[in-house]
Image (cartoon, helix red, strand yellow):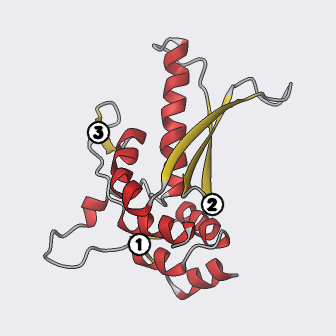
Amino acid sequence: MTINEKLSKIQVEFKSKKSRFNSFGKYNFRSAEDILEATKPFLKELNVTITVNEELLTMKPGSCDQPVLKTVATVSDGKDSISATAIVGVDTEQKGMQMPQRYGAASSYGKKYALGNLFLLDDTQDSDATNQHGKATAAKQKLTNESLAKAKEYINKGGSIDAIKAKYVVTKKHEEMLTL
């Protein structure tokens, strides 16, 4: 099985509930730790590893005073690998937080979105929201501009359109956009 096929299997079968609650914004979410925990069953089965690396980027003078973290999530089978990146600014003016907390918050956010990019997670809809618990087939997610861009990147790296179709509603127009 190629690394693309292994990643496709994870993307199609991946399940991670939004088990955390943001009391300020009144919404449920999943954390990077939740995502990583949900990948564990695939690690041994597919003989892959998942790594997350961060780099503090130095900004060019005059471009932006805000520090930026580059986070790269990678799935590897020891021979080949596929990575996805997230770029996150560090809000050094965040009130009520110490500086380490500001960097930690940016780090957590970057990890979550790099992993989401790698596994094609659409943060607008939880998998349980469409799960009918055996009563009917779960509805597929609609392709948003963001998920369409991720899907195109995935296809360009050798991924399968069938993996995209298994998770998302893909119209003829979407399919043309993905295969151009």
Which numbered disc, 2 or 1, marks the residue closer to the eye? 2
**Image marks 2 and 1: residues in contact by CB distance under 8 Å:** no
Q: Which residue is mark 3?
A: 20
**Which of the 4 image quadrants contains residue 64?**
top right
Inter-mark Cα distance, 2 to 1 = 24 Å
Inter-mark Cα distance, 3 to 2 = 33 Å
Coordinates of residue 155 in the picture (x, y in percent)? 62, 73
Which residue does the image show at 64% across and 66% down from the upper left?
A: 153
What amino acid type should be assigned to the residue bearing mark 2? Asp
Which residue does the image show at 70% across and 81% down from the upper left?
A: 180
**Which of the 4 image quadrants contains residue 9?**
bottom left
Coordinates of residue 12 in the picture (x, y in percent)? 40, 69
**Who is closer to the viewer here, 48 or 155?**
48
Considering only vertical position in the picture, is 176 above or below 95? Answer: below
Q: Secondary structure at mark 2?
A: loop
Which tag, 2 or 1, sits closer to the chain's start?
A: 2
**Who is closer to the viewer here, 54 or 142?**
54
Which tag, 3 or 2, sits closer to the chain's start?
A: 3
Inter-mark Cα distance, 3 to 1 = 23 Å
Q: Which residue is mark 1?
A: 167
Which residue does the image show at 53% across and 56% down from the upper left?
A: 118
What amino acid type should be assigned to the residue bearing mark 3? Arg
Which tag, 3 or 1, sits closer to the chain's start?
A: 3
Coordinates of residue 156 in the picture (x, y in percent)? 67, 71
**Which of the 4 image quadrants contains residue 128?**
bottom left
Q: Secondary structure at mark 1?
A: helix
**The disc label shown at residue 80, or none:** 2
Residue sitting farthest toward the right: 61
Q: Is residue 99 left or right of residue 179?
A: left
What amino acid type should be assigned to the residue bearing mark 1? Lys
